Image (cartoon, grey):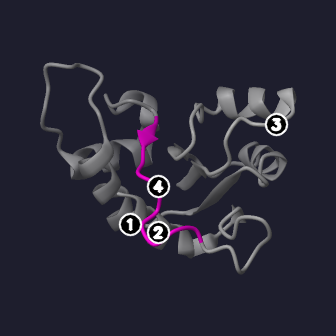
Amino acid sequence: MILVIRISGHVEMRKDFEETLFRMRLRKKYSAVLLKETKDSQPLLQAVRNFVAFGKVDPKTMEELISKRGKSLDNKIKKIDSKKIAEIIEKDGIEKAGIKPFFRLHPPRKGIDSKSHYPKGVLGDNGDKINELVRRML
């Protein structure tokens, strides 16, 4: 699974990029979605790489993300089983898991590393470093 986190806001963004992020369900800053690794998702990620951080998420981080920031579609259910939902997401996708298809995250603790990439250091493909970024944002 690929985790995509929106880093950049709406100000001075072209409409076509804003529409692409809107369709990916990345409507606000510091929101995240899980995408399956397909050949159709790669051009989409390359188009919005200057506004998002993405990378391959490991199962432990995905379970932690679901347990801390996952919200059920049914408001009456307060507690969700993160291990079971993580398995469902791996098999069938997030639509059949019974949780909202996006996660609202906190801004990263200790800030965004801006030394490695101008103007914001975490933009683009982060590979396995996305797991560290998500843990700082939970």
Kindly identify which numbered label has been placed on residue 86.
none
Earlier sequence position, callout 4 versus callout 3? 3
Kindly report which numbered mark, 2 or 1, lies closer to the viewer in this rendering. Answer: 1
- Element on which disc 3 rests: loop
Kindly report which numbered mark, 2 or 4, lies closer to the viewer in this rendering. Answer: 4
Kindly identify which numbered label has been placed on residue 13.
3
Q: Residue at x 57, y 51 (%)?
A: 5
Q: In this view, does 50 lie to the left or right of 55?
A: right
Earlier sequence position, callout 2 versus callout 4? 4
Q: Give the CA distance from mark 4 to mark 3.
A: 20 Å
Residue 99 placement (x, y as % from top left): 33, 31
Q: What residue type is labelled 3?
A: Met
Residue beneath disc 2:
131
Kindly identify which numbered label has been placed on residue 135.
1
Q: What residue type is labelled 2?
A: Asn
Within 10 Å of the Cα at label 2, are there few (<14), some (14-19), or many (20+) other Cα atoms? Answer: many
Q: Is residue 80 left or right of residue 88?
A: left
Does residue 127 sit above or below 73 in this rendering? below
Kindly report which numbered mark, 3 or 1, lies closer to the viewer in this rendering. Answer: 3
Which of the 4 image quarters holds residue 74? top left
Residue beneath disc 4:
107
Which range of residues does the magenta coloring cover?
A: 102-112
Q: Which residue is drawn at 46% across and 62% down?
A: 108
